[in-house]
Structures are given as C-alpha cells and as structure tokens.
Image (spheres, rainbow, N blue to C red):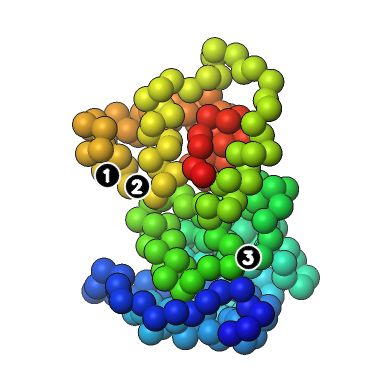
C-alpha cells in the first residue's frame, strides 16, 4: 500500500503453531492501513479480535470484556494519544503485551511510550516480515526496539554526565539487559550466559533498582539514555 509506510512483502516463515491463536487488538486511525495489517495478521495465524480508529473506542471495548494477548497501537491517534492509552491498556489488560507501530521517531515520543509501559517500538517503514518478527519477540518476553530508534537514542545521549558507582551497571547486568533488549527470553539469556534463570532474574532486578525503573522496557530505555547499551 502506498503511503502507509509498511511494505507487505511475501513471507516464507510462519509463527510457531499454537493450540490457541494469539489474540491481537489493533489501534490505527488510517482505515486502509489498519485493514492491511489486520489481513496480514489473520493470514499468518493470529486472531485480530478488534480493529479501532481511536484509543477511546478500543478502551471501551476492553472495558466491555474484549480480551487480547497483544495490543498493537499507533501513537498519533485522534482524541486520546497512544501514550496515554498505553497506560490505560496496561491497567485494564495487565497480562497483555503492548507493541507500538508508528511513524514517529522523535526521542520524546519514544521515551514516553516506553515509560508508559510499551513492550516494544516498531517504525512503520518496514516489511510485514519485520512486523511478524517483532510481534514474536514481544510475545516471547523480549523488548524489541526498531534499529532506527535504537540508533537515534544512542546518538542523542552519547554525551552524558558521569553516574555514581551506586547507579552504574556491572558488566554482567549490562550483558543481561543487552540480551533482553534484543528479544531473548530469560531462559535464553540464562543459556547464552551459562547462568540459572534465577540469576538472570536477580540481575534484571538489580538493574531496575540502579536505573530507578519498574519494568524492562523502561530499563532498556534508561540504559540507552545513559549510554550503557548499544543496540545500533
């Protein structure tokens, strides 16, 4: 579709087969783009249980009982913004993952979305294959950031004031956070670093304390802001 920013190219790899399809809510105000994304998701074995043009309509449906495993949302929506909506979605569907799919690449919106609780951030200028890969990373517990976003954040915050030893991450904490940011699950991180899953969890908790955050997306965002992670 011209002008939507996402190229729907043929894909050869399918998501892992599941007994129950992953339920996805799609919030996107451009009807043609929303329908195209919904079509791709359904063709790839996901269940697009609701498509909405505003955050208000989506939240009303959720309050009325609509459930989902993942919410895919734009940020530039009419009425309530995507950032404000993410916070509401996380409150109403605490078990669901939230992935941002937007054209916005400025750091203010990126940080705001991650701090609101988004589990990943993908720019629309990409292929359908990239969308599916990112969805799978999010569903596996990862926190994928679009390479354009990661590179932009890193360049923006290269010049930082020194941080205290108490707030500086250890090499191992950085390694764990770096792998988590690349989309690896805690078990996969444990296997990669020859650690127990419990140790991985402890390293992540220590990172939260040092970075003064309460979730993994915010930890990744703050670590990038401080120049501790390089995802470019």
Q: Which residue is mark 3?
A: 102
Crowding at label 2, few (<14), some or many (≥20) Cα neighbours within 10 Å?
A: many
Sequence-wise, the earlier of marks 2 and 3 is: 3
Report the label total. Answer: 3
Query: In this orientation, does residue 89 appear?
Result: no
What residue is shown at x 25% (from left), y 38% (from top)? 192
Q: Which residue is mark 2?
A: 184
Q: Is disc 3 placed on a helix, strand or loop? A: strand
Left or right, 102 with respect to 197, comes to: right
What residue is shown at x 51% (from left), y 26% (from top)? 209
**Of residues 134 and 79, which is closer to you in this image?**
134
Q: Are marks 2 and 1 in contact (CB under 8 Å)?
A: yes
Crowding at label 1, few (<14), some or many (≥20) Cα neighbours within 10 Å?
A: some
The tag on residue 188 is 1
What residue is shown at x 65% (from left), y 51% (from top)? 110
What residue is shown at x 34% (from left), y 47% (from top)? 184
């Amino acid at each position: 579709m011209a002008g939507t920013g996402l190229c729907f190219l043929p894909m050869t790899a399918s998501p892992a087969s599941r007994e129950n399809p992953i339920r996805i809510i799609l919030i996107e105000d451009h009807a043609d783009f929303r329908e195209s994304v919904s079509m791709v998701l359904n063709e790839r074995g996901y269940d697009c249980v609701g498509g909405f043009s505003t955050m208000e309509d989506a939240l009303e449906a959720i309050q009325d009982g609509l459930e989902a495993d993942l919410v895919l949302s734009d940020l530039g929506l009419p009425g309530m913004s995507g950032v404000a909506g993410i916070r509401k979605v996380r409150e109403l569907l605490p078990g669901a993952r939230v992935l941002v799919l937007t054209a916005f690449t400025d750091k203010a919106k990126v940080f705001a979305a991650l701090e609101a609780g988004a589990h990943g951030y993908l720019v629309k200028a990409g292929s359908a294959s990239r969308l599916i890969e990112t969805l799978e990373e999010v569903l596996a517990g990862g926190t994928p950031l679009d390479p354009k976003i990661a590179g932009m954040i890193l360049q923006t915050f290269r010049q930082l004031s020194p941080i205290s030893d108490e707030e500086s991450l250890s090499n191992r904490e950085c390694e764990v956070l770096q792998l988590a940011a690349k989309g690896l699950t805690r078990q996969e991180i444990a296997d990669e670093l020859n650690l127990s899953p419990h140790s991985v969890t402890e390293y992540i908790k220590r990172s939260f304390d040092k970075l003064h955050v309460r979730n993994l997306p915010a930890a990744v965002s703050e670590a990038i802001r401080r120049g501790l992670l390089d995802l470019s």
